[in-house]
Image (cartoon, rainbow, N blue to C red):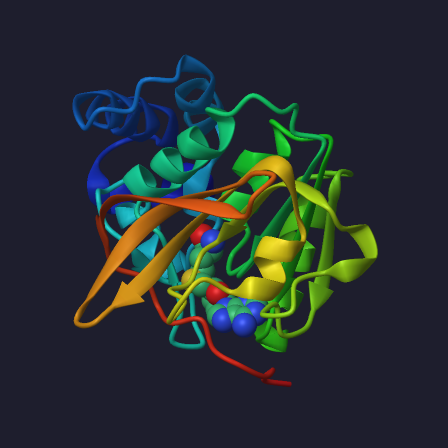
């Protein structure tokens, strides 16, 4: 079944993944733990079956409801930025669960991942996927993630997988001192991936590179 879905690419999933990992290395991903995790995770099971033969390509893909799974490079890059900090990652908050691929990657590095998604239909599918993978350290919520998830704050890390018009202050407040938030911020006609570190005085924002994400939106879709 799994190899069936990938037939169009002429590669078995493991071979397609190995190819993806080599490409990520060439693209500058340095952390072996991130590469090893992505090499094991069957990304083709997170996208629509019709798209499975592109699952390991260097592109974002539709996941339904007009949303997209980020390209492998972006997932690797955001995870790497999240891991390159001094605090131990006991709790991570993710805004924008989508198909749950980034969530699953993060779940290998944190004690607990909390994730929020505003589209009910999308989250329902992803919840089933989490059950299929028998992960037990991901807690999810159907809600607007803009205000964060106060009940479990503060977080060691926060990742936002949709582009915010500006730094969401509510999220910054839920970050631990020394914690890092990784997110795309919309600046005029382009988006920049940013690393935000909270310190005693406030936050320090570092711009990393241009990216392309779907927008972070208010409210929920039932
Ligand atoms: N990490 C996901 C990316 C999905 S795209 C993946 O790899 O599949 C971004 C997601 O953010 C979409 O599912 C979108 O519905 C969600 N999103 C956008 N604004 C949001 C908000 N305010 N709260 C929660 N989720 C949001």
In the rendered structure, the answer to whether residue 189 lies left or right of residue 134 reads left
**In the depicted view, which residue is nearer to us: 175 or 200?**
200
Where is 17 relative to 220, above or below? above
Q: Quadrant of residue 51?
A: bottom left
Instruction: Judge by depth and name the residue closer to the eye, 40 or 69.
Output: 69
Percent x, y of residue 149 = 72, 60
Q: Which of the pair 118/100 is nearer the observer?
A: 118
Looking at the image, residue 100 lies above or below residue 136: below
Residue 142 drawn at (x, y percent): 69, 70
Image quarter in which the C terminus is found: bottom right
Residue 109 falls in image quadrant: top right
Q: Is residue 75 above or below residue 146?
A: above
Residue in the image at 17% along x and 22% along y: 26
Residue furthest front as drawn: 201
Which residue lies at the image location 45% right of the left edge and 62% below the top edge? 167
Q: Residue at x 58, y 40 (%)?
A: 104
Relative horizontal placement of residue 117, taking residue 82 as reference (left or right): right
Q: Residue furthest top?
A: 32
x and y percentages locating residue 103 in the rendered image: 57, 45
Foreground residue, 18 or 216?
216
Count the numbered circles shown. 0
Horizontal placement of 205 versus 26: left or right? right
Determine the residue positioned at 40% across, 39% down. 78
């Amino acid at each position: 079944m799994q190899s069936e879905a990938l037939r169009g690419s002429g590669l078995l999933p493991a071979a397609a993944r190995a190819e993806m990992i080599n490409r990520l290395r060439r693209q500058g991903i340095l952390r072996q733990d991130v590469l090893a995790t992505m090499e094991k995770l069957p990304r083709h099971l997170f996208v629509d079956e019709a798209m499975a033969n592109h699952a390991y390509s260097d592109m974002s893909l539709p996941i339904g409801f007009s949303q997209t799974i980020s390209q492998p490079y972006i997932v690797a890059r955001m995870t790497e930025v999240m891991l390159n900090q001094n605090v131990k990652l006991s709790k991570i908050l993710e805004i924008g669960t989508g198909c749950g691929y980034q969530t699953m990657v993060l779940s290998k590095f944190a004690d607990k991942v909390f994730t929020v998604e505003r589209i009910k239909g999308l989250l329902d599918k992803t919840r089933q996927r989490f059950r299929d993978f028998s992960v037990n350290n991901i807690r999810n919520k159907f809600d607007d993630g803009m205000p964060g998830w106060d009940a479990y704050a503060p977080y060691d890390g926060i990742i936002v997988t949709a582009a915010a018009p500006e730094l969401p202050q509510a999220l910054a407040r839920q970050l631990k001192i020394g914690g890092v938030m990784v997110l795309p911020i919309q600046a005029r006609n382009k988006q920049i991936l940013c690393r935000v570190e909270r310190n005693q005085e406030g936050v320090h924002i570092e711009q990393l590179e241009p990216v392309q994400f779907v927008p972070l939106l208010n409210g929920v879709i039932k």
